Amino acid sequence: MSLFGTSPTEAKAPSTPSRSRGGRGAGLFDDDTAASSGDTGLFADAEQQGAGDDGNHADSPWNMPTPRKHQSRAELIRKLLPAAEVPESYIETFESVVRQDGNDSGRVAAAGIAKVFATARVDADAQSTIMSLLAAGGNASNLTLGRGEFSVLLALVGLAQEGDIISLDGVDERRTNLPRPKLAGLTAEPVLPPIAELAAKPPQAPVTAVAISEAPQIPEQHQAILRPAMDDPEDDPWNTPDMHKGHAHMKPNGLGGAVLNSHSTRSTVGRTGSAVEESVIVTLMPGKEGVFMFQHHNYEVTSQRRGSKVIRRYSDFVWLLDCLHKRYPFRVLPLLPPKRVAVNGNHLSNDGAFIEKRRRGLSRFINALVRHPILSQEQLVVMFLTVPTELAVWRKQATISVQDEFTDKALPPGLEDSLPRTLEELFTKTRSGVVRSAELYINVCNIMDRLVKRTEGVAADHARVAMSLASLTETSADTYATDTNEVPLLNDGLTAMSRHLRTCQSLLEDESKGWDEGVLEDLKRQRDALVSVRDMFERRDRLDKDNIPSLERRIQTNETKLATLRGKPEGAVKPGEIDRAAENIIKDKESIVQQHNRSIFVKQCVRDELITFQLTQYHVSRWNQDWAGERVKYAEMLADNWRRLLDQLEGMPLGC
């Protein structure tokens, strides 16, 4: 008998049969099982190793099965879909992507994978599942794909688009009929935008000749809008929705798009115009990421019009604003909420109420960007809203330019003469009004915040009174024990009053929440716009400076020196000294021209920003009208509640 209780003469136990699928061998990625000698699947046991040893396994002194040759997961994925078995579109897509986003070894880099995800429009969960399958436990941020792995990627994306289960077994089952993913711009297959995106698209009314003639003319330097911030061979590497290509978005008469809340659906169409503003939704993701001291919140940023949904953290918003400050210092750049707030020496960064306020601030920030006529077209903003990968990873791979928008820009003829001579006076007057208005709006926002909290307190007091009245009904019989005949009627009245006070509490709480998410957000939006303009003027004071007077004095000095040098005998001048003096004069004159041109561009830019800012006056009208409408609605509901109560109190005893 063997040491472990078995005998060499015992019959060998039958092996556990492997799970079959459709009459085939074991599943492509099932757990390893002892396969029979007839298995020929990709994951079957290797050819019987004893074949070279007289083909007799029974001669083994240990009577053990031959160890199975395991292949690495990466190797299995690489060999899963040979090039000869994939559709032609897979090969064409690989060659297209590897040309643009391939590395030196002919493999698709992470940027190419991100482009496939962006054009396929698969959600974040599907992307995460696909990357986990392809990375096979490795670092997904540094993943590169060869032809075989890329074919598996396309097959998985195709399964996701068809709503099928995303798995490597699913790819194996479809080897004879592989799904063909729809990738706009990468394949020839047409891709229709999602139904929700079509619903969000405003009706395209024909533009009349009168409207064209009355529309403000866009300055020439803005017509080419910005050169791309990314040195990318494609104008639209992430395939933003076709509905934005070639659009010259008409500026609405008013700023539509009031804050949506759960209490009332507020129209996003301006009362003075019919254009619908783009709206981006920022949602706080549950839980935190990171380890103990370095945990952070994530936010889901959804743009229905662009058909995108990405995950960003607060530091990503900070990075975007920092880039915009460098590239557009003379534009009205929106404000970011603070990362934390100090209260009595304590920093609030994890308080639930503060986190919600910060989420709303981030929402105001990103919506101000997408509604700006220039910043909304900036490539950095487009990438921030559409790149599905983690932004920190994308920043390492992308070539980002944050050069000032006016650098090396030629001054169009006639631009300087087209600017009014009184432009500086207009800037000074507007700035004084903006500074004062910003202070007032800051004060109004603080007062409105107190009103919200006070209304919540009034609602709580109504609940306390209702509770006390309900308790009175329990003591009425004892209090008026001398004659209890009318106590039931008295209690009925107290119960009715208590019930209606509860209704008042609900109405006041609802109104308070409506103010918090409605008029207060409208006021903060207007406050942010004013403070942004104020900051733009301050940046202009700090950055729009020149040293033209000192350059002119230096040119005059160098010209005098040059004339003196040329008047000297030929041997008395050092070699190259005349050329250096002439070169210095030319450089200083070129610097004067560049600085002068830049100052003209800055003036035009500030003027255009003030024209755009002028539209916020319609937003002032909107929040006033909306707030008045809210007050009327709740006042009528409260009055109706008291009227109904008065009818129910008619039966209370009066003793006369």
Image (cartoon, rainbow, N blue to C red):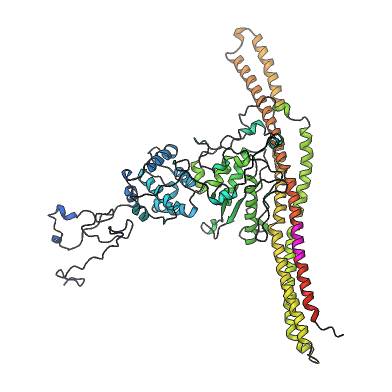
Any part of residue 340 in sight: no
Any part of residue 204 in sight: yes
From the viewer's side, name the closer residue of 645 and 594.
Answer: 645
Quarter of the rendering occupied by the N terminus: bottom left
Where residue 7 appears, as percent x and y from the top left, is 16, 71
Q: Within the magenta stretch, is there residue 274? A: no
* Magenta highlight: main SS: helix
**Up-down relation of residue 17 to residue 341 (above or below):** below
Tell me the residue at 58%/48% (across/down).
Answer: 305
Residue 330 picture quarter: top right
Q: Is residue 82 left or right of residue 507?
A: left
Where residue 522 appears, as percent x and y from the top left, is 71, 53
From the viewer's side, name the closer residue of 265 and 366.
Answer: 265
Considering every residue shown, the one lying at the far right of the view is 656
Residue range highlighted in magenta: 628-636
Where residue 364 appears, as percent x and y from the top left, is 65, 50
Q: Is residue 442 left or right of residue 163?
A: right
Q: Is residue 174 left or right of residue 583?
A: left
**Up-down relation of residue 477 to residue 218 (above or below):** below
Tell me the residue at 70%/64% (across/down).
Answer: 510
**Up-down relation of residue 6 to residue 227 (above or below):** below
Q: Within the magenta stretch, is there residue 634? A: yes
